[in-house]
Amino acid sequence: MSRRKQINCAYCDKEKLSKNEIGLNKKLIHRQIERMMCLTCLAAYFETTEEDLKIMIEGFKFEGCDLFG
Ligand SMILES: [Zn+2]
């Protein structure tokens, strides 16, 4: 049994959000956020594109943020 709880998107049917998706939720919205969004829903929420969010993730990784892997 895995200790890591599987996190699904709260807004669509996507299951098992990646570490980067979860990191972005925490980074952009709130550290203690309970309703996580997948990349697609995050993009819609922030009126941007998934591609831009991926670039953002790379930027956070580059800064050495431990929320991203
Ligand atoms: Zn979603």
Image (cartoon, helix red, strand yellow):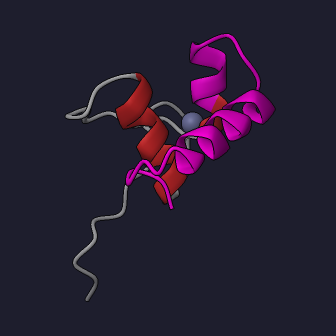
| Front position in the image: 12 or 2 | 2
Q: In this view of the protein, can residue 41 be seen by the observer?
A: yes
Within the magenta stretch, is there residue 55?
Answer: yes
Q: Main secondary structure of the magenta part?
A: helix
| Front position in the image: 9 or 42 | 42
Relative horizontal placement of residue 12, taking residue 47 as reference (left or right): left
The residue furthest front is: 63
Q: Residue at x 55, y 50 (%)?
A: 61
What is the x, y in percent for residue 66? 38, 54
Q: Residue at x 65, y 45 (%)?
A: 58
Write down the quadrant of residue 43 in the picture. Answer: top right
Relative horizontal placement of residue 45, taking residue 47 as reference (left or right): left
Q: Residue at x 42, y 48 (%)?
A: 65
The residue furthest bottom is: 1
| Front position in the image: 32 or 13 | 32
What is the x, y in percent for residue 30? 29, 26
What is the x, y in percent for residue 29? 37, 22
What is the x, y in percent for residue 20? 53, 51
Q: In this view of the protein, can residue 15 be seen by the observer?
A: no
Q: Residue at x 67, y 10 (%)?
A: 47
40 vs 67: above or below = above
> Where is ligand 1, by quadrant?
top right
2 vs 15: above or below = below
Within the magenta stretch, is there residue 7?
Answer: no
Relative horizontal placement of residue 4, taking residue 13 as reference (left or right): left
Residue range (magenta): 41-69
65 vs 30: above or below = below
Task: Indicate the quadrant containing the N terminus: top left, top right, bottom left or bottom right.
Answer: bottom left
